[in-house]
Image (cartoon, grey):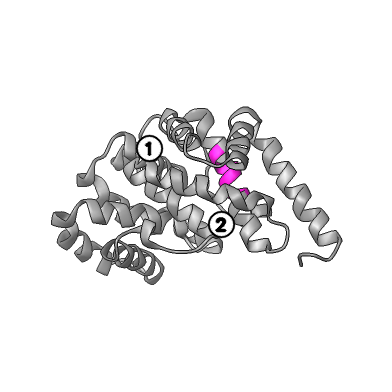
Amino acid sequence: MLRLLQSSALLLVLAAANIGTAQTSATELKTVEEVSDFMQTYYLHPQPELIGNLIEALHPSGLLQIQKANNINPVIGFFSEIFAANPNRLPQWQVLIAKQDVQTKAALDQALSAAKSGGVLKVSGHTAGLNDMYWGAFCASGNPKFVYRLVDQLQYFDERNDESLFFAGATAMWSLASNAKTQPAVHSAIEDARTKADKRTQELISKLVTEDPEKIKLDSGEIVRKQRETGKWK
């Protein structure tokens, strides 16, 4: 996980925030990797009939325990879109949710609340955690609006006063760069956003679609190091 930037940025435990291309069968949802792969590739092969299996696999797989440090935001974002898109299935899913452990139930209840309030796009703020929600919601839906919202956060990559705002910009920058390399839908949405962006955002987009995501992560870490050395950030 991207510990330096204090965000999973859609990692959901797997490396480099790369969304996979082959979906795991719901009958194989036992490990963290299997659950993560199923969620990350869901928008490519929507199967709402298998979401019950996913709900029951969250706790046994250990996914939520690992994601606890990141407030489980990608999971909340993912399920908020699933719930909003399948209102007819909610009654049966709510029966399953009620049977889960406290941690799983709390995360899914937050997702349900977000869905009923208009979804993640209605959540205001600029944080690394909200970026995670956007990515989780994108994995569930493939809706480019979530990528557009991440592009909007790039303006904070130049922030040097508010550390939290910088993290919003840096995690957006790195996660967009990572996913643009492997996902045509993400790359296409970024390019679409470029046509409507201001000059500086266009420059940052050019950087993230051409540079190695690992270099972007390292550069971001160097900014953090220098700001903390000077006492600007703690």
Residue that appears at 54% across and 40% down:
176
**Where residue 202 appears, x then y in whole percent?**
58, 36
Q: Secondary structure at mark 1?
A: loop
Q: Which residue does the numbered mark 1 point to in the structure image?
A: 41
State the mark number for residue 128: 2
Residue type (three-letter) at the residue carrying disc 1? Thr
Q: Secondary structure at mark 2?
A: helix
Would you say the magenta stretch is mainly helix, strand or loop?
Answer: helix
Residue type (three-letter) at the residue carrying disc 2? Ala
| Residue 34 image-quadrant placement | top left
Residue toward you, 71 or 195:
195
Q: Is residue 203 left or right of residue 229?
A: left
**Where residue 105 appears, x then y in whole percent?**
34, 68
Residue toward you, 210 or 61:
210
State the mark number for residue 199: none
Report the residue that reaches farthest toward the right.
230
Residue toward you, 209 or 61:
209
Q: Is residue 14 above or below residue 209?
A: below
Residue toward you, 7 or 50:
7
Whether residue 2 can be seen here: no
Q: Which residues are magenta?
A: 170-176
Q: Is residue 117 left or right of residue 155?
A: left
The answer to if 172 sits in the magenta stretch is: yes
Alpha carbons under labels 2 and 1: distance apart: 22 Å
The answer to if 13 sits in the magenta stretch is: no
Whether residue 169 can be seen here: yes
